Image: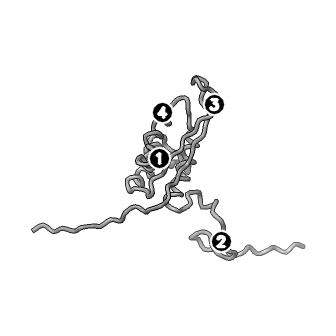
Amino acid sequence: MTQRKTFTVHDPPDTEPVEFEIVGTYGNRHRKAGKEWSETFTLVPEMPVGSVALWQQTATTRDRRTTFLPGPTILFLSSILDNNMNKSSTRFQLLCDDPNRVVSMDELVDIMEWAVQELTGRPTGPVSSLPVGPEGTATSSEPESPPAEETPTV
């Protein structure tokens, strides 16, 4: 006899859409060279688990240096854009392929960090950029060092 288990999953939250805008200037080869362009994109209401897996592939660390990888970063961002609202994912892919509207890798990383923070409600910056707690509280898992004793001067 086959055993069966049913898992009931929750519906995505019914939240107001979160949008962001990318603004730039057309490149020199475009007929609108020098003129401003903008695109507005809408995030999905909740990060799908498949997107979490993609997010983990966006960067690699070697010798304590983090390098963000363009392909996985673009795929991840596309996966968290709501195609039902305003074709955000499709338009984002087109933007990333457009030689006249260039978005740098640093700018993509800024967008990605902001979007993850919006979707998870958690900061994505390094621990050193987070506010320090009240005096006397440790900010790491290491015990606090006792204060150094002062050496008297003669």
Label 3 belongs to which residue? 35
Asked whether the residues under the numbered discs 2 and 4 touch, taking CB atoms below 8 Å apart as contact, a structural biologist would say: no
Asked whether the residues under the numbered discs 1 and 2 touch, taking CB atoms below 8 Å apart as contact, a structural biologist would say: no
Seen at 44% across and 53% down, the residue is: 44
In the rendered view of the protein, which quadrant contains the C terminus?
bottom right
Chain-order first, disc 2 or disc 4: 4
Q: CA distance from mark 1 to mark 2?
A: 33 Å
Q: Which callout, 1 or 2, points to the residue nearer the camera?
A: 1
Seen at 57% across and 48% down, the residue is: 110
Chain-order first, disc 4 or disc 1: 1
Chain-order first, disc 2 or disc 3: 3
Q: Amino acid at mark 3?
A: Lys
Asked whether the residues under the numbered discs 3 and 4 touch, taking CB atoms below 8 Å apart as contact, a structural biologist would say: no
Q: Amino acid at mark 4?
A: Asp
Q: Against 57, is 93 above or below? A: above
- Across and down, in percent, residue 122 comes to 53, 62
Horizontally, residue 151 falls left or right of residue 92, namely: right
Marker disc for residue 133: 2
- Mark 4, Cα crowd under 10 Å, few <14 / some 14-19 / many 20+, is few
Asked whether the residues under the numbered discs 4 and 1 touch, taking CB atoms below 8 Å apart as contact, a structural biologist would say: no
Q: Quadrant of residue 105?
A: top right
SS type, badge 3: loop
SS type, badge 4: helix
Label 4 belongs to which residue? 97
Q: Amino acid at mark 1?
A: Leu
Q: CA distance from mark 2 to mark 3?
A: 46 Å
Label 1 belongs to which residue? 77
